[in-house]
Amino acid sequence: MLHIFSFNLTYTEVTIILAVALLTGMSKTGVFGAGMLSVPLLAVVFGGQVSSGVLLPMLIIADVFGVWYYHRHASWQHLKILFPWAAVGVVLGTVLGKYIDDTVFKVIMAGTIVVSLIIMVWLERLSPDRIPQQKSFAIATGVAGGFTSMVGNLAGSVMSVYLLSVRLPKNVFIGTTAWFFLVVNWFKVPFHVFLWHTITWRTVLLNLLTLPVILLGAWLGIILVRQLNDTLYRWFIIGMTVVAAVAMLV
């Protein structure tokens, strides 16, 4: 048993936290399914809602690195539509999240990933001219992304559905996602601190200890994504989502 900033953690739990830090870093430089795997892993250690507050500072640290590396590739045309509706989703998630216990949390998150996966595969089978491009699709994505991000830091699958559907090139996909989550995650911080009380000084200090591992994960993500062309990358995202869906259901 290790005593770290008032947390009583077993060696196994410390290993899980470090694994989550590595996966979080990878997720912000293009390996998005890795971020989805972080959620069920950290929930094993801290439970549903508490783990969302522990994970958020890790995500913000990794967001900064992702934006620094991919900032030139963002599609602001799509982000300008998504941001205000994501804020609505965050507020909705803040209100409803207080009434969601760990069992319901797991059902919502598993359902989100599985439904997103089905839609991803369906969109890949459509010809480009049949893919939904309406503004209402972007609005629904923004609300769903904000809600799932607030409740469980699991908007990656929702955003992947939307950004895959608009056929963004690989680097633009990653840069747009990086900017989206940097802004949305900072927007969530006051709600976690003052309403949910899931971010405290001791959770922040715990997160800072994981900084070197997060940076290592970000570097590994860059190396991995460089090896994939746009088509392979799209199917790579779908494959990682399958892995995340199985992990959440298990």
Image (cartoon, rainbow, N blue to C red):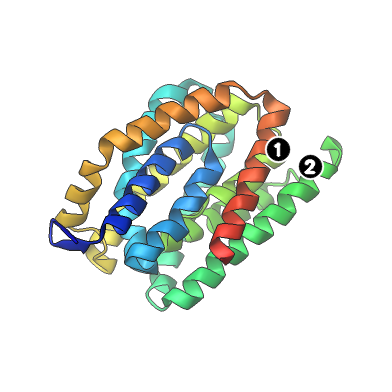
Categorize mark 2 by other alpha carbons within 10 Å: few (<14), some (14-19), many (20+). some
Q: Residue at x 66, y 47 (%)?
A: 161
Check disc 1 and report the residue beneath it.
235
Against 49, residue 132 (above or below) is: above
Against 195, residue 5 (above or below) is: above
Residue 209, image x and y in percent?
21, 43
Against 47, residue 5 (above or below) is: above
Image quadrant where residue 125 sits = top right
Q: Residue at x 44, y 52 (%)?
A: 38
Against 182, residue 199 (above or below) is: below
Image quadrant where residue 11 sits = bottom left
- Type of amino acid at the residue the image marks with label 1: Trp
N-term-proximal mark, 2 vs 1: 2
- At mark 2, the secondary structure is helix
Residue 90, image x and y in percent?
43, 59
Mark on residue 15? none
- Type of amino acid at the residue the image marks with label 2: Glu
Residue 31, image x and y in percent?
53, 37
Residue 143, image x and y in percent?
54, 57
Q: Is residue 90 left or right of residue 114?
A: left
Q: Residue at x 31, y 58 (%)?
A: 13
Mark on residue 124? 2
